């Protein structure tokens, strides 16, 4: 009984530390405001924040309660597409913040083509997620 309580407290503490580190990372790098700026949706920044909170809590509850869904291959594809869009936009905002895109543009002399580099990053992330969901999960 005592071991179970201690293990639960340790697991909870680890989750709090990891969650806090993730939120600190997102906050320090201003990923959400930058993502809103890149997509010209600054007026919906609260929607971004609430979506991240609701998604995080939902995924934790689904994992803890061991909830599963029976969906078709089309449903898996649509889920993969949306997850790929999220990961692609998140990764693109992160690379923009850490100045990866300007370095790529300068290195390969792609001045004037920055948005295509940005779209290529997004497309690659979306396709990777899409292929993962279609060929590995389903």
Image: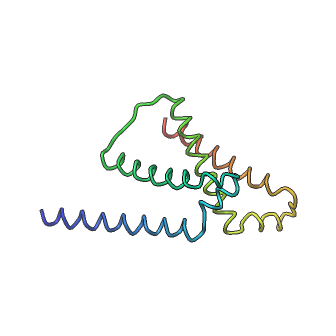
- Which residue does the image show at 49% across and 52% down from the upper left? 50
Depth check: give the residue in front, 33 or 20: 33
Give how far across and how far down residue 97 sits, in percent. 67, 66
- Which residue does the image show at 62% across and 57% down from the upper left? 91
Which quarter of the picture shows residue 118?
A: bottom right
On screen, residue 86 above or below 13: above
Depth check: give the residue in front, 38 or 19: 38
Which quarter of the picture shows residue 34?
A: bottom right
Depth check: give the residue in front, 138 or 4: 4
Is 133 left, or right, of 58 in this rendering? right
Give how far across and how far down residue 114 sits, in percent. 80, 57
- Which residue does the image show at 18% across and 62% down from the upper left? 4
Is 124 left, or right, of 111 in this rendering? left
The quadrant the N terminus occupies is bottom left
Give how far across and how far down residue 66 sits, in percent. 32, 44
Depth check: give the residue in front, 38 or 136: 38
- Which residue does the image show at 53% across and 68% down from the upper left? 25
Is 124 left, or right, of 70 in this rendering? right
Give how far across and how far down residue 10 sits, in percent. 28, 68
Count of numbered tags: 0
Which quarter of the picture shows residue 5?
A: bottom left
């Amino acid at each position: 009984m005592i071991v179970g309580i201690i293990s639960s407290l340790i697991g909870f503490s680890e989750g709090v530390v990891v969650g806090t580190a993730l939120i600190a990372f997102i906050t320090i790098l201003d990923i959400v405001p930058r993502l809103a700026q890149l997509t010209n949706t600054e007026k919906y920044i609260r929607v971004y924040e609430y979506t991240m909170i609701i998604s995080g809590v939902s995924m934790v509850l689904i994992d803890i309660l061991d909830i599963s869904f029976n969906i078709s291959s089309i449903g898996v594809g649509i889920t993969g597409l949306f997850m790929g869009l999220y990961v692609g936009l998140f990764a693109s905002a992160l690379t923009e913040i850490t100045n990866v895109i300007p370095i790529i543009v300068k290195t390969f002399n792609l001045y004037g083509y920055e948005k295509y580099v940005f779209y290529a990053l997004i497309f690659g992330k979306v396709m990777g997620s899409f292929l993962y969901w279609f060929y590995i999960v389903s």
